[in-house]
Amino acid sequence: MSIFIEVVLPVLLVFGAGYAIQKWKKVDIRPVSVVALYAATPALVFDTFYGADFNAQYTWMLLFAAGLLAALIMFNKLAARLVKADESKESGWILSTAFMNSGNYGAPIILFAYGEQGFAYAVTFMVIQAIIMNVFGVYYAAKGYAGARYAVKSVFAMPVTYALFLALFLEFTPLSMPENLLGTIDIVADAAIPLVMLILGMQLANMSIGHFQWPSVTYGVVVRLLVSPLIAWGLTALMPMDPLLANVLIVSAAMPSAATIVMYAVQFDNQPRYISSVTLVSTLLSVFTITILLSLLQ
């Protein structure tokens, strides 16, 4: 119960504030999302990577992200083959289970649970996941007509990408960011996590509980909230990584489905109702599963 009160509840209260605002005022989320995407999140990414102490742990994080994605895709392909699901259903399963909400849900949970060092790992993993979603998420959402060119274009359309490149450039060259500009970036970066948390609450308010395809929704939720962290635990056990990093990655892997994937599903008309359903149900149930997982990892 103490973990729920100290870690999960503060995050839920911010989500709840965003949810209440959206239900009350019916705000257009797009301008708010633009602020988060083009200002706050890039500032947070730059702030995290600029001056970061890069070591072997970041290499293990990259290998972990690739291994988790590959394992989840293979798991879904095997499940689809076992039940003779068509390609559309297989793509829907992959979209709803292979991409987790490591940013506006995972990062604040890890901040409350593991402090600043854990949060630095979480933001790095968030950037890796954002790139993965903009490549593999777009591919599986489009599945055939968007192609690799669209995926690459999406990656380079992300302001976060350029914030990352600039931070790494300054990190590995004699150049440095002027202190007054760094102070400005710090101010904007501090707004990123509360802003994306409010946006998630607003997104949840726009989702409706309708006639779910309960067998498929149940499958997606179980894979996202239970199978994914089990795979993550197995991967971290095989890699000689810092125990704090291992815990951060396992918790990140246990996050609900990414809300960004819903936008891709809508854009490419690839089972948007199903993917929205899994996102909503997995987000609601994650309140319990994340609390239990954090207790087990203590």
Image (tube, helix red, strand yellow):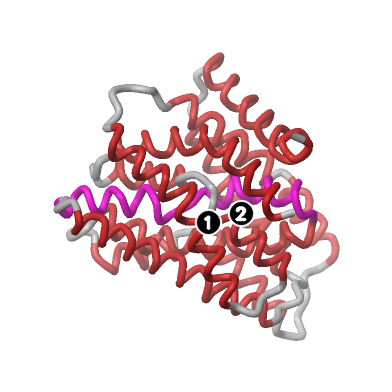
On screen, residue 52 above or below 218:
below
Instruction: Please say if the residues under marks 2 and 1 sit with CB atoms less than 8 Å apart.
Output: yes
On screen, residue 98 above or below 170:
above
Q: 92 or 295: which is nearer to us?
A: 295
Along the horizontal axis of the image, is 29 left or right of 278?
right
**Quadrant, the N terminus:** top right
Say which label, 2 or 1, has the lower sequence index: 1
Residue designated by label 2: 251
**Quadrant, the C terminus:** bottom right
Q: Which residues are magenta?
A: 86-115
Taking the spot 47% from the left edge, 56% from the top edge, the residue there is 228
Along the horizontal axis of the image, is 80 left or right of 52?
left
User: Which percent across, then down, holds residue 89?
Assistant: 21, 48
Alpha carbon of mark 2 to alpha carbon of mark 1: how far? 7 Å
Res 229 label: 1
User: Which percent across, then down, holds residue 117?
Assistant: 77, 62
Q: 122 or 89: which is nearer to us?
A: 89
Is residue 251 rendered magenta in the image? no
Q: Secondary structure at mark 1?
A: helix
User: Which percent across, then down, holds residue 77?
Assistant: 26, 61
Say which amino acid is labelled 2.
Val
